[in-house]
Amino acid sequence: MSKYFVGIDVGTQGARVVMVDEQGVGVASGSRQFVLDDRFREEQSPDLWWRFCKGIMDNIFANLPANIDKRDLVAMSVTSTSGPQEWSSIGQFAANA
């Protein structure tokens, strides 16, 4: 059984996800660009980040090669240029970033 790792990067212009094996070889990846307008350049919604990342990951997992089982995913790392976000007690992000 191989082990796999997922890295998620949310930047100013979009979200990227990559899945690698134990040797660091990329086995799947995806990205999605944000629509940037004057307002969106100043403030972005963490809910949008989450929807984009989830959509990319859903697509990656749905299209994995037959020899890769998503249950072999052992770790995930997330990075963002906009800093940490707080999840509120009512099940949503506390504020835009």
Image (cartoon, helix red, strand yellow):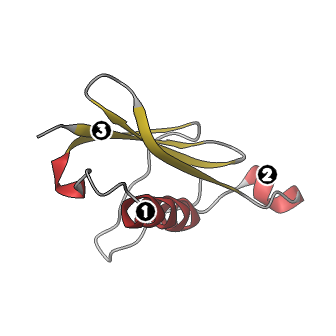
The image's mark for residue 63 is 1
Q: Secondary structure at mark 3?
A: strand
Residue tagged 3? 5
Mark 3 or mark 1, which has the lower sequence index?
A: 3
- Quote the CA–CA distance across marks 2 and 3: 31 Å
Specify which label sits upstream in the sequence, 2 or 3.
Answer: 3
Residue 73 lies, in percent from the top left, at 22, 47
Q: Using residue 23 as the reference point, say whether residue 48 is left or right of it.
A: right
Q: x and y percent of residue 91 in the render? A: 33, 74
Measured in 3D between alpha carbons, the distance from the residue under mark 2 to the one under mark 1, in whole angstroms, is 32 Å
Q: Residue lying furthest bottom in this view?
A: 90
Where does the image place residue 48, in percent across and percent down from the top left?
58, 66
Quarter of the figure with residue 39: bottom right
Camera-near label (2 vs 1) is 1
Asked if labels 1 and 3 touch by Cβ distance under 8 angstroms, the answer is no
Residue 53 vs residue 70: left or right?
A: right
Residue matched to label 2: 41
In this rendering, which labeled residue sits more in front, label 3 or label 1?
1
Report the amino acid beneath label 2: Arg
User: Which residue is depicted at the point 58% across and 60% down?
Assistant: 96
Position in image of residue 78 (x %, y %): 40, 41
Q: Residues within 10 Å of mark 3 (few under 14, many from 20)?
A: some
Q: What amino acid is labelled 3 in the image?
A: Phe
- Quadrant of the rendered image containing residue 32: bottom right
Q: Please tell me which residue is depicted at 70% across the width and 56% down the height of the picture.
A: 43
The one nearer the camera, 85 or 67, is: 67
Q: Secondary structure at mark 2?
A: helix
Which is more N-terminal, label 1 or label 2?
A: 2
> Would residue 35 be found to the left or right of residue 10 on screen?
right
